Image (cartoon, helix red, strand yellow):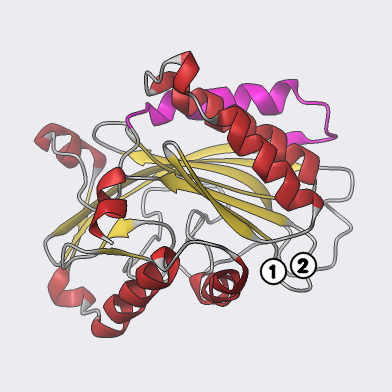
Amino acid sequence: GSYRNPAEGSGAYRTAAGGYGAGSRPTGSGSMKPEGKKSNAGKTVLIMAAVGLVTIAMVAFTNLEGYLSDYLKGAAETTEAYNYDYESDFTRLNDEDVIEAGEPCMAYYHFPADGVYVSEQLLAAVESSDFGYKLDSDELYTDNYLYDDTSYFESIRSLYLEDNLSETRDDEYTDQYIDVNYDTVTNELHDYATRLYSSEASLAFLERFLTATEESSGIAAEDRKADEIMEEARDIVQQEQSSYIYEGLFIIEIYRYEGEDALYVYASYNDPELGSEL
């Protein structure tokens, strides 16, 4: 099955120093997984070492006018500056405690959308799709902790999918999934990630994610960006590129690892304040 190092992070989330960057998340172990389920260790955490290489390559052919390079530089500096001391700085918390406290986590940018609602829309999309997939398992686990005075409160719903070739693939990373990550306290959406062999299905589920998120966020119909994003996303996939899309509420990464057939899609919140700071 698929494994991604839980000590490596992804997406735009806050570091303990109050900055934002990739690769600084101290863990993602999913401490409250349902008993009897396969491990979700690091399930929502993409392999940032590899993503970093892809991203550096992206800078060569994306016209982001220094935005991406500045972002990555800051992320790299933040990552290098951290030496994690789990015994003294790491505190595990349970759902009841963080919900009772009532404070949203500090670690992620939060979409103004209900992550539970979005995850239900993705489940409905899977169940009604005709891409040859069936739902293998629908799993929810939480990962709530404090690290160096920064709170990470995550609820991750993982939809594991199977197709008719799932049992015969011989590559190391075989899991196909849709992940929706949201705040344990507020249910506000954190991010979205998929790994699927079907590009057509990847695009269809991305579209459902975009429309559900914009709907839940209260974006007026005339201001929604899902159609524009999907046009660009289809072009990226058709040309077999790896690239970023910055549009509306969303930062979207679409990419493949070298030598791997699966398509990865990752979406996080395009916070306007972050853009104005760079």
Residue appearing at x 85%, y 61% in the figure: 169
Residue 123 colored in magenta in the image: yes
Q: Is 271 or 95 nearer to us in this picture?
A: 271
The answer to whether 227 is drawn above or below residue 172 in the figure is above
Residue appearing at x 13%, y 33% in the figure: 100
**Residue stretch in magenta:** 112-135
Q: Is 84 or 70 nearer to us in this picture?
A: 70
Q: Which residue is mark 1?
A: 257
The answer to whether 142 is drawn above or below residue 277 in the figure is above
Rendered location of residue 20, percent (x, y): 28, 62
Rendered location of residue 244, percent (x, y): 56, 55
Asked whether the beta carbons under mark 1 and mark 2 sit within 8 Å of each other, the answer is yes
Q: Which quadrant, please, contains the N terminus?
A: bottom right
Q: Could you tell me which secondary element the residue under label 1 belongs to? A: loop
Does residue 144 show up?
Answer: no
Left or right of 115 in this view: 102: left
Does residue 57 show up?
Answer: yes
Q: Is 22 or 73 nearer to us in this picture?
A: 73
Task: Tell me the amino acid under the disc marked 1.
Answer: Tyr
